[in-house]
Amino acid sequence: MPKGDYQSQTLPTELIEKIDEYVENFPKYNSRADFIKEAVNDKIEELKERKEIEEKAKEIELSEKEKAFVEELMKKHGLE
């Protein structure tokens, strides 16, 4: 990202200390910023996936209700 596309945020000291400890002990991350960027991106993806799952579950639920309705109509009209 270009330099002008950054904003800073304030985090509690306790959280920063936990992040720093993780960064220090795991060489995957070069800096606190790398860790935070990945953590935020992971959380955004998780929330997107959760939303998709919830939407799919609603579709399935609706499909089940539709199926039950059709079955009820078929029974009512002797079309079993």
Image: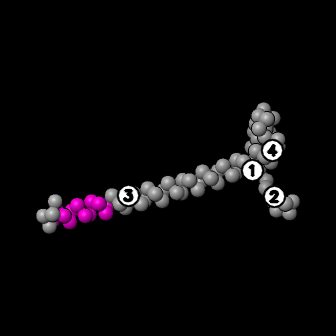
Q: Are marks 1 and 3 in contact (CB under 8 Å)?
A: no
Give the percent coordinates (x, y) of residue 44. 64, 54
Q: Nearer the viewer, mark 3 or mark 2?
A: 2
Q: Which of marks 4 and 2 is in front?
A: 2
Q: Is residue 63 magenta?
A: no
Q: Do the residues labelled 1 and 4 touch (CB within 8 Å)?
A: no
Return the residue at label 2.
1
Can residue 13 be seen here?
A: no
Q: Residues within 10 Å of mark 2 (few under 14, many from 20)?
A: few
Q: Are marks 1 and 2 in contact (CB under 8 Å)?
A: no
Instruction: Please report whichever mark, 4 or 2, sits nearer to the chain's N-terminal start.
Output: 2
Instruction: Please report whichever mark, 1 or 3, sits nearer to the chain's N-terminal start.
Output: 1
Q: Residue at x 27, y 59 (%)?
A: 68
Q: Residue at x 62, y 53 (%)?
A: 45
Q: Looking at the rendered structure, which numbered label has been put on residue 6?
A: none
Q: Residue furthest right?
A: 3
Q: How many labels sit on residues? A: 4
Return the residue at label 1.
37
- The answer to whether 66 is drawn above or below residue 19 in the figure is below
Q: Is mark 4 on a helix, strand or loop?
A: helix
Return the residue at label 4.
32
Stretch of the chain drawn in magenta: 65-76
Q: Quadrant of residue 69?
A: bottom left
